Amino acid sequence: MTAKHQRLTLALLAVAAVVAAALLAMSALKDQASFFYAPSDVAKQGLPLGRAVRLGGMVQAGSIRRAADGVTVHFVVGDGIATTPVTFAGIVPDLFRERSGVVAEGQFNRDGSFTATNLLAKHDEKYMPPEMAGKMHETRTLEP
């Protein structure tokens, strides 16, 4: 075998090894990936039972109810097309409120509800901490 053929064979083996490694990595991560769904996606595609997913949307007005234990929160997430009831047991983020964005990590139940293990409250890009907003106003009054 000539040196040219040896280099070609070695290059083909290297490409095959990289492809095999990528396929193995994707196979291993397939079960670990957390998919994102909106309530309307669930209404169209059905419930993704038995796997960790993320449910995102807006907390519906008037839907937040706190249980007597002081830790469990029930609320409804919607996207303008469909809604999904959510239950979360834990401390909610400071930005969690009605008519604000939320991403809930957890699993769907057979009845169509969602049990969250983690909540991520979202805010719009206009958000500014109150301390900074006050300083911004002070700065503006000092400018000529």
Image (cartoon, helix red, strand yellow):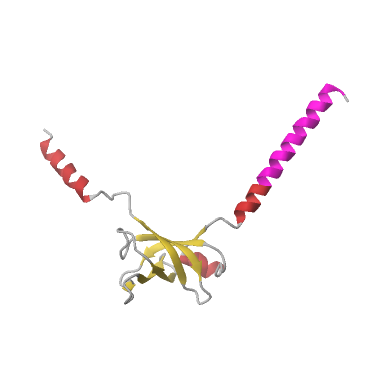
Report if residue 130 lies within the magenta region: no
> Which SS does the magenta portion mostly show?
helix
Position of residue 36 measured from the top left corner of the image (x, y, whole percent): 50, 58
- The image quadrant of residue 143 is top left
User: In the image, is residue 143 above or below residue 132?
Assistant: above
Residue positioned most to the top? 3
Q: Residue at x 18, y 42 (%)?
A: 136
Range of the magenta residues?
A: 2-23
Position of residue 126 measured from the top left corner of the image (x, y, whole percent): 29, 49
Q: Residue at x 66, y 44 (%)?
A: 22
Out of 56 and 108, give the one closest to the viewer. 108
Position of residue 9 measured from the top left corner of the image (x, y, whole percent): 80, 31
Residue positioned most to the front? 69
- Looking at the figure, which quarter contains the C terminus? top left
105 to the left or right of 130: right
- How many labels were placed on the picture? 0
Report if residue 22 lies within the magenta region: yes
Q: Residue at x 77, y 34 (%)?
A: 12
Q: Residue at x 54, y 68 (%)?
A: 44
User: In the image, is residue 61 above or below residue 9?
Assistant: below
